Amino acid sequence: MIYRIEKKAPIRIVGVRIPLTCDMDKNYKLISSFWEQIKQSGMFYEILNLNNTPQKKVFGISIYNEGDEVYYYIAATTDKPIPEGMYEYEIPESIWAVFESRGPFKESTQTIYKRFFTEWLPFSEYRYTEIADVEVYPVYDEITVSGYAEIWMSIKKENKS
């Protein structure tokens, strides 16, 4: 797994969201269907046009709120107003394990999530913080289903006493 550790400032996102469940396999199916729905509805391009970065990117983000609420956002980083029907969220400053992903997005991102929890995290000096899980997809001239992406997992250095 190719990765780097980075500290990132708070990030404001705007986009659409769905609630997730406690069942990871069910969530994979929900998220896949959600992406298809957003791409087919034209909402994808509305989100893409919110970008305020030179390289347009679309984010898939799992947000862990207090309690048991977990939402998955398809969003962009932006300083623009929130369009009707969309939501805003600010991801707090955090330390991230940033994993590189290449290949079909659906399969490669799911593989990274599984390997993060089973191979990387147990043998690292970090603990998972559940602030957010961030998927970063660069967008060029058209919607693609394969290529380079990044998976950011929020972490904190483990205090070994």
Image (cartoon, rainbow, N blue to C red):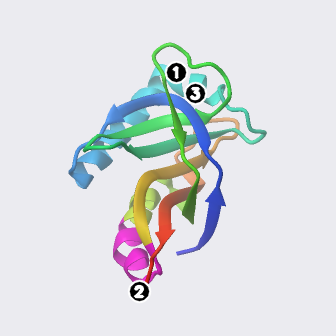
| Number of marks drawn | 3
Residue 116 coordinates in the image, percent (x, y): 41, 70
Residue 145 coordinates in the image, percent (x, y): 52, 46
Mark 2 crowdedness (10 Å alpha carbons): few <14, some 14-19, many ≥20: few
Q: Earlier in the sequence, mark 2 or mark 1?
A: 1
The quadrant in which residue 147 appears is bottom right
Residue shown at 45%/28% (left/top)?
A: 16
Q: Earlier in the sequence, mark 3 or mark 2?
A: 3
- Residue numbers of the magenta segment: 114-126
What's under tag 1, amino acid-wise?
Gly
Magenta stretch secondary structure, dominant: helix
Checking the image for residue 47, the label placed there is 3
Residue shown at 67%/23% (left/top)?
A: 80
Residue that label 1 marks: 42
Residue that label 2 marks: 161
Residue 96 is one of the magenta-drawn residues: no
Provide the secondary structure element on which disc 2 rests: loop
- Nearer to us: label 1 or label 3: 3
Q: Which quadrant holds the C terminus? A: bottom left
What's under tag 2, amino acid-wise?
Ser
